[in-house]
């Protein structure tokens, strides 16, 4: 039996459009596979070739703390409040400081009393000195006259002895007053210096205590109230944590990559759909543990190099503690030049 070859209808569509569609699909598939491969390579190894890291928006940290053991009476600010430098943020009381101020004040009063007595004694000595010098002069003249009379036989010996004794006592009293004047002057100077130091100590302690008012050291945002009302804190324990108004980004960069960061380089800071520019201010010579929000569960704590990035002037700064993503600006030309330097070939131009 012979098969009859079907005739081709002139209305049968050509296979060329189908072949063209298959080629397009094939290229789309290959492009998707290539893009996926590039994405996987970039996901695992991209940070070795260009800057791609996470960071936190921070402000200059500061704390409100007492320089003495104290009891917290009240907080005048809440978390999230903006404070200015010098603003009263908390009220405390300290029995130790109160006792120290009272003891120093009593000591100052005693020293002032002693100083007043020395000054009175000094005035008395000054007043007696002129009389003592006059007395010594009269006694000396009397003794000289008695010696003249004694040599001529007009005076008995006991009168001459009495004149010598009077001159001796007058000289002794004069020297005693002079010595006492020197001692009083020395003690007055020493006590005056000690009294000035004691007064300065009282003023400094009262200034530090400031009636129990603790003030904010910088202008910024209150981020945490560490202690509670009625808590007893030691000297130096923070009561309030602050972050300054000037924000910057602290970023963590993996070490061992081909690229090298340097101060002055521009980077892009991305948070959500918003991107601003930043400038690397400082590359720290140490590595630090990543913050908890950057660590994945069930993995060891990673340590990476720390860099500080300042926002470009005029850009709106993200809120404090915002997690941001960083990457290089126009990283392809920069990466190529660094790659050539890495392999030892000078870049063109």
Image: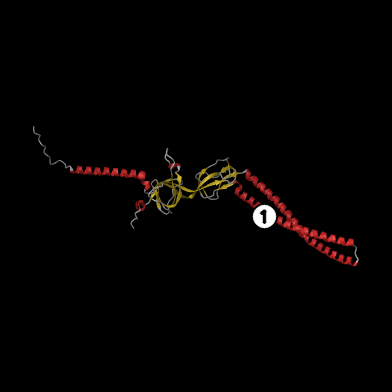
Write down the quadrant of residue 26 in the picture: top left
For this orientation, the residue located farthest to the left is 1
User: Residue at left 70%, top 50%?
Assistant: 110
**Residue 27: image location, x then y, percent:** 25, 44
Question: Is disc 1 placed on a helix, strand or loop?
Answer: helix
Dot 1, crowdedness within 10 Å: few (<14), some or many (≥20)? few
**Residue with the mark numbered 1:** 193
**Residue 224: image location, x then y, percent:** 51, 43
> In the picture shown, does residue 13 fall above or below 193?
above
For this orientation, the residue located farthest to the front is 151
Task: State the quadrant of the C terminus.
Answer: bottom left
> In the picture shown, does residue 28 fall above or below 333?
above
Write down the quadrant of residue 20 in the picture: top left
Camera-side residue: 133 or 167? 167
**Residue 181: image location, x then y, percent:** 74, 58
**Residue 258: image location, x then y, percent:** 37, 49
Task: State the quadrant of the N terminus.
Answer: top left
User: Residue at left 36%, top 43%?
Assistant: 44
């Amino acid at each position: 039996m012979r098969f009859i070859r079907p005739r081709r209808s002139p209305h049968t569509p050509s296979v060329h459009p189908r072949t063209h569609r298959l080629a397009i699909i094939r290229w789309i598939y290959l492009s998707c596979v290539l893009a996926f491969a590039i994405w996987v390579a970039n996901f695992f190894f991209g940070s070795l070739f260009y800057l791609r890291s996470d960071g936190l928006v921070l402000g200059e940290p500061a704390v409100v703390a007492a320089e003495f053991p104290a009891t917290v009476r009240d907080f005048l600010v809440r978390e999230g409040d903006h404070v200015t430098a010098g603003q009263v943020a908390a009220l405390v009381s300290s029995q130790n400081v109160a006792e120290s101020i009272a003891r120093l004040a009593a000591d100052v009063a005693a020293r002032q009393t002693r100083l007043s007595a020395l000054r009175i004694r000094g005035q008395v000595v000054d007043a007696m000195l002129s009389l003592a010098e006059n007395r010594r002069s009269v006694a000396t003249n009397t003794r000289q006259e008695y010696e003249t009379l004694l040599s001529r036989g007009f005076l008995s010996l006991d009168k001459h002895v009495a004149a010598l004794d009077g001159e001796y006592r007058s000289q002794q009293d004069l020297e005693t007053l002079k010595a006492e004047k020197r001692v009083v002057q020395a003690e007055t100077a020493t006590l005056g210096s000690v009294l000035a130091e004691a007064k300065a100590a009282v003023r400094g302690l009262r200034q530090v205590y400031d009636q129990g008012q603790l003030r904010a050291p910088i202008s910024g945002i209150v981020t945490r109230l560490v202690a509670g009302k009625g808590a007893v804190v030691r000297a130096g324990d923070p009561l309030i944590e602050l972050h300054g108004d000037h924000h910057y980004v602290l970023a963590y960069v993996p070490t061992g990559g081909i690229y090298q960061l340097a101060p002055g380089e521009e980077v892009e800071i991305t948070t959500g759909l918003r991107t601003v520019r930043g400038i690397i201010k400082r590359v720290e010579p140490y590595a630090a543990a990543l913050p908890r929000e950057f660590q994945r569960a069930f993995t060891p704590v990673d340590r990476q190099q720390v860099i500080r990035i300042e926002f470009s002037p005029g850009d709106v700064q993200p809120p404090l503690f915002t997690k941001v993503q960083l990457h290089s600006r126009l990283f392809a030309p920069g990466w190529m030049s660094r790659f050539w330097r890495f392999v030892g070939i000078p870049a063109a131009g």
